Amino acid sequence: MKVAKKQNIKQLVLIAFALIAINIIGNYFFKRFDLTEDKRYTLSQTSLNIIKSVDSPLIIDVFLEGNFPPEFKRLQDETKQLLEEFSAYNSNIIFEFANPIENEEERVAVMKQFYERGLQPLNITVENKGKQSQEVVFPWAIASYGDKSTKVSLLKNLMGASTEQKVISSVQHLEFAFAEAINKISKDKQKKIAVLKGNGELEDKYIADFLKTVKESYYIGPFTLDSVAKQPTQSLEALKKYDLVVIAKPTEVFTEEEKQVLDQYIISGGKTLWLVDAVKADMEEMFNETGTILAHQRDLGLNDMFFKYGFRIHPLLIKDERATPIKLATGEQGSDTEFQQYFWKFAPFIYPETQNPIVKNLEGIKFEFTSPIELLNNKINKTVLLTSSEYSRPIGTPTEVSLASVTEETTPEEYQGKGLLPVAVLFEGKFSSMYTNRILPFKDNSYVAEGNASKMIVVSDGDIIKNQLDQNGPLELGFDKWTNNLYGNKEFLMNCVNYLLDDTGLINIRSKDVNLPLLNKERVYQNYTMAQVLTIGLPMLILIVFGFLFTYLRKRMYTK
């Protein structure tokens, strides 16, 4: 007995020393193992760099808490596991899950505060053995760092998609959403964006939500080309100080001097985001006594410039069967006007089909009076980001556009071989100046015919950036107050900006694929008893058998 006692003490001391040694080694060598097939918990190097740069407490409040159906429970679990991964690499990242409306007495006041911050709730139906109940969920998180904070959307708003599809898409988006939020509030602004003015571009109130969102991550300011007429070289030097120029729906012709300034900015490596209408047709003008407008070509004087860069925007209108809805007055019922919803085929509802990180896993985007982009052969790399649907076709201009067309009937044959028209294209490479072998509009000693590599995104719709207004001011970009639909316009444009300015590879996190198998609820309901046996009864049975077996073997060992 004494020998056995000494051996036990010796083993205990060795185990204690081994545990202490493992802990000491663990402080110097850190490694986590991801055993999932799709490596969903393996963070990208970009995310790791962002996380490790946080040098003081960063608080993430997640409001995804409450009585959820299985799909939302899965989203909650995936969010928690991802944040645990973040926190494991940097203890300064602290997160907490909370139900903001758990207290019934403060429910109304809290919901009002959330509405004011743009944290829209979601009404979901919870089913339990055939019984249904309604629950309010806030699929949002708020990340705070010092005196800065930003909101994080946890649920993708895929119109027409099932809850399961939305959850799968949302899980794929989680790492990018949190990494972008942390990067936004923990890093100082560095890049500068110029919003071009002077050629009839959209007023600030119509791009207010875009400006507000961009301002969180970048310096931004207006840049007017009016000074080019008197001081072209100084204007060019001033423009070169910006990293990106946004041209939002110009309506007036660009002079040759203005084009030279833009051309040399691009040749020097400046990035540009073009949101251009090739046809004059505005939705606001449709609501007149006749409900018609004459759509015709809008000449901006940019055709030769675009041709040199490798594309044309044709002065045609795209008519698409996959369209966004509008509400029109159809009569009166008593003292109230009666409205009916129709699909407006001149406002295509465009879903991204490519795997480019700018548009991958993106919600549907609303276009309005858009035109097809033709790609020309040159040495610039071209990536089509968005196209119209298979059931779309170009309409020549000038043409009369009438609201009465919402009731017209069409056949698939009308669109045979005419659809899939590019409406947003990414250009990358070394651009050649449009003034090569031409007389320059103004003398510029720094002029070069071909310079640094650059990037450019062209969208053939100026209204894609336009937010609606109500009595309280600008609404969120992509939100349609008439149908209460929220489209992916803002996320698409922010992805464009981030891609054009991104030097850290943050946008590439969007390319991550996650395989998220979900439970088939119908099969579970059909075999409810069997599901209970497999998920509850079988594990308990295994534990009981293991317990009896362990007890039996232990008694047999010590009774000898």
Image (cartoon, grey):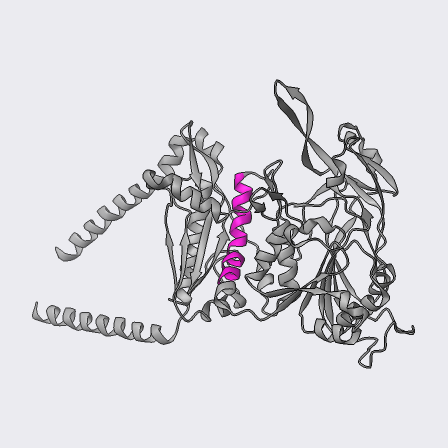
Which span of residues is magenta-colored?
163-182
Residue 384 lies in quadrant: bottom right
Residue ID at (81%, 75%): 450
Tell me the quadrant of the picture where the N terminus can be found: bottom left
Of residue 492 and residue 397, the one placed in the foreground of this image is: 397
Q: Position of residue 520 (x, y in %)?
A: 49, 37
Residue 180 visible somewhere in the drawing: yes
- Quarter of the image with the C terminus in it: bottom left
Determine the residue located farthest toward the top in the rendered image: 334
Judged left or right of residue 343, residue 53 is left
Q: Quadrant of residue 241?
A: bottom right
Q: Does 179 appear in magenta?
A: yes
Please, what is the dominant secondary structure of the magenta stretch?
helix
* Residue 343 drawn at (x, y percent): 71, 34
Give the residue at the far front of this rendering: 230
Q: Nearer the viewer, residue 212 or 452?
A: 212
Q: Position of residue 439 (x, y in %)?
A: 91, 73
Foreground residue, 298 or 512? 298
* Furthest residue toward bottom: 445
Residue 360 visible, this angle:
no
| Viewer-side residue, 19 vs 8 | 19
Rendered residue at 81%/46% (across/down): 280
Taking the image as shown, residue 72 lies to the left or right of residue 205, namely left
Q: Relative to 512, does residue 473 appear above or below in the rendering?
A: above
Residue furthest out toward the left: 2
Classify residue 336 by image quadrant. Answer: top right
Residue 320 location (% of width, % of height): 76, 39
